[in-house]
Image (cartoon, helix red, strand yellow):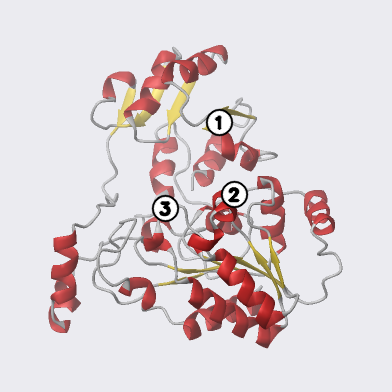
């Protein structure tokens, strides 16, 4: 979601050397990206003084601080960067030379209390129509506008662009050969049934299985099952192993379980190869959309209006919600009956995937 802002920054300063400070596990996302000259990784648990020392070595003229944390502002202050621009927030304004006020259109993602959720669910239908406590949004509420607003403080164009990541044709061909997809004759679809944030973002695995089975019957597709190393290490608890066993029984050799088996660049190449990705609201969803692959996403505890994939309103994607009055709650686990995601039917997801795959 930062990539539109980075592209506008590059547009404004075509000759600048732009370095991105990024978590180590995400460094390879930025390979060959047109807006970034260099990526500096930081490790999980790395102390603020070490990060500041890394940045100080670059002798940068200006720091644009995308995160809202006090730490991120402290790091660039410790690095001695002369200009430091970020949003005004408690405990960090001292470290910034330009503390940008919050946008008028910004919407805070507030976690609901259990009492509030129960109150909303207990409300009658007529009341829900007008006062169900849903997150109210506007056309510019999406998170990518937060980053665009910051680069606008430097004179860059704040108009949105589609999120963009880059993968080369050679990388796609190498991934096809490594995972033996160069001989596949039918369409290739992607399935990403995990989500690190928590179970409140995971459409039930049995629904994934039923949808994938029906789609395979109607398209003769090959499914690629994606997931990170944590998914591979705990497949039984995440439901991924159960899904694999069902696919083996019901669809013969029409699936390939790649959870934990790909590098980040290989994941990107395979997502680009997919005709459509059926996924929860998670990292690979955003990566696929930024690579131009249509995504179908059942949303539960989170808001597609605020953090959905791609450019808001992109007709290639299908972002599905139920009418649960307590959604979005922004919680990791559902304190009641998981009605937000249980309310999204298999049939609805199947039709969404088929319509996306036909349109590509």
How far across and down, in percent of the image, does residue 145 sit? 40, 48
Any part of residue 162 in sight: no
Q: Is residue 257 left or right of residue 60?
A: right
Residue at disc 3, secondary structure: loop
Q: Nearer the viewer, residue 320 or 197?
A: 197
Q: Nearer the viewer, residue 70 or 203?
A: 203
Q: Which mark is residue 229?
A: 2
At x 37% / y 67%, what residue is drawn?
A: 300
Q: Is residue 177 left or right of residue 133?
A: right
Q: From mark 2 to mark 1, how far is it between C-alphas?
A: 25 Å
At x 44% / y 15%, what residue is drawn?
A: 49
Contact, CB < 8 Å: mark 2 with mark 1?
Answer: no
Relative to 315, does residue 195 appear above or below in the rendering?
A: above
Quadrant of res 271:
bottom right
Disc with the residue nearer the chain's start (3 vs 2): 3
Q: Which mark is residue 20?
A: 1
Quadrant of res 222:
bottom right
């Amino acid at each position: 979601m930062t990539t539109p802002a980075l592209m506008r920054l590059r547009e404004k300063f075509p000759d600048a050397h732009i370095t991105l400070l990024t978590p180590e596990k995400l460094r390879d996302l930025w390979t060959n990206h047109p807006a970034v000259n260099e990526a500096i990784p930081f490790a999980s648990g790395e102390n603020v003084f070490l990060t500041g020392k890394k940045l100080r070595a670059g002798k940068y003229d200006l720091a644009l601080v995308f995160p809202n944390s006090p730490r991120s502002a402290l790091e660039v202050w410790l690095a001695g960067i002369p200009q430091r621009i970020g949003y005004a927030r408690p405990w960090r304004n001292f470290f910034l030379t330009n503390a940008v006020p919050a946008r008028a259109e910004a919407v805070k993602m507030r976690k609901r209390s259990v009492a509030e959720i129960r109150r909303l669910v207990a409300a009658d239908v007529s009341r829900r129509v007008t006062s169900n406590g849903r997150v109210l949004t506007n056309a510019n509420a999406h998170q990518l506008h937060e980053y665009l607003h910051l680069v606008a403080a430097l004179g860059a164009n704040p108009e949105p662009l589609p999120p963009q990541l880059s993968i080369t044709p050679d990388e796609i061909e190498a991934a096809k050969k490594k995972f033996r997809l160069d001989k596949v004759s039918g369409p290739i679809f992607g399935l990403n049934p995990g989500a690190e944030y928590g179970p409140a973002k995971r459409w039930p695995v049995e629904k994934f299985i039923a949808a994938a089975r029906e789609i395979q019957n109607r398209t003769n597709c090959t499914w690629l099952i994606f997931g990170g190393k944590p998914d591979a290490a705990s497949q039984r608890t995440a439901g991924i192993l159960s899904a694999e066993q069902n696919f083996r029984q019901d669809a013969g050799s029409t699936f390939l379980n790649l959870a934990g088996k790909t590098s980040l660049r290989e994941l990107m190449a395979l997502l680009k190869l997919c005709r459509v990705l059926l996924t929860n609201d998670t990292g690979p969803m955003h990566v696929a959309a930024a690579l131009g692959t249509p995504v179908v996403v059942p949303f539960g505890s989170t808001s597609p209006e605020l953090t959905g994939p791609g450019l808001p309103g992109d007709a290639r994607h299908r972002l599905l919600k139920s009418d649960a009055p307590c959604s979005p709650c922004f919680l990791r686990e559902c304190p009641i009956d998981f009605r937000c995601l249980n309310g999204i039917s298999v049939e609805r997801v199947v039709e969404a995937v088929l319509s996306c795959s036909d349109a590509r």
